[in-house]
Image (cartoon, grey):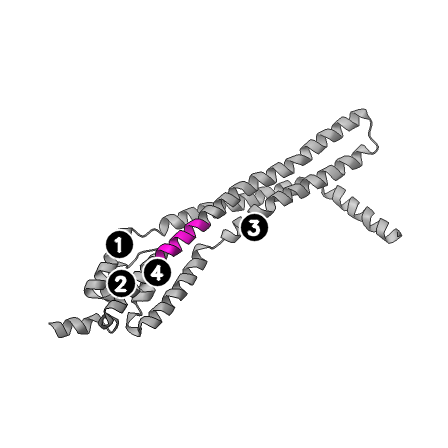
Amino acid sequence: MNNGTDIGSHLLDLMLRAGSSWILYLLLGLSLLAMTIMIDRIWFFFQERTPVPMLAAAVRELRRDGPDAALETLAGARSMQAAVARACLSHAQEGIAAVEERKAGAIEAERARYEKRLAFLGTLGNNAPFMGLFGTVLGIIRAFHDLAGSSLQGTQAVMSGIAEALVATGVGLLVALPAVAAYNIFTRRVERTISATEVLAHEILAVLKAEPARGSGYGSSRAAAE
């Protein structure tokens, strides 16, 4: 029984010493980190844009001149669609089954690259309110502890302390809302990009399946025709 009381006393003393200020500083640091990740992802998605006309031109080149010509059209393009298209086109001579496997592997690799650091935003958005609530609880514990032996004038100060403790919950929500919004926006952007990439990859596969001769190399076919 005494052990339980001692543990409770030690925990109370620890919480009174800790207070809620460190929670606020932690939330502030996490919010700055979240803002850095948001800016990084915005810049990343801005750079990873391949114009639709370029992708359409690559498909036209594939139909007309073969994989090598399409690869030249996509040279230097930075996007998931361009990367997966290059993975398919560069292995066209290995057969349709190999191209499909290359497509699946390239999409998963690109998904990991596009979703980089997004898990942090999702985790912060889900847990920041609980961190703020924990800070409020610590502040209220201290306030009620001070209330035990205070006068009327001291009681007013304690109420002021409780109001300050509630700030931690507000800060937690303030940190969580933009993190959740950014996570949802970026995740939706990734899913839309994957869908567009799947459409492009299927179009490439359809061209390769429609004309098997192209899978064995366009250069030889064109040379024979000439």
**Residue in the image at 68% along x and 36% along y:** 165
Q: Which residue is mark 4?
A: 83
Question: Mark 1 falls on what kind of element?
Answer: helix
Residue 202: x %, y % from top left = 32, 62
How would you rate the neighbour count of disc 4 (Cα within 10 Å): few for under 14, some for 14-19, many for 20 or more?
A: many
Report how far apart the C-alphas of labels 3 and 1 lie in the structure.
37 Å
Report how far apart the C-alphas of labels 3 and 4 lie in the structure.
29 Å
Q: Which residue is mark 2?
A: 71
- Where, quadrant-wise, is the C terminus in this rendering? bottom left
The amino acid at mark 2 is Leu
**Sequence-first disc among 3 and 2:** 2
When the figure is inspected, residue 156 is found, relative to residue 199, above or below; the finding is: above
The amino acid at mark 4 is Ala
Give the magenta range: 187-198
Q: Which residue is mark 3?
A: 123
Evaluate if marks 1 and 4 touch, with contact meaning CB atoms under 8 Å apart.
no
When the figure is inspected, residue 186 is found, relative to residue 66, above or below; the finding is: above
**Residue in the image at 60% along x and 47% along y:** 127
**Sequence-first disc among 3 and 4:** 4
Report how far apart the C-alphas of labels 1 and 2 lie in the structure.
11 Å
**Sequence-first disc among 3 and 1:** 1
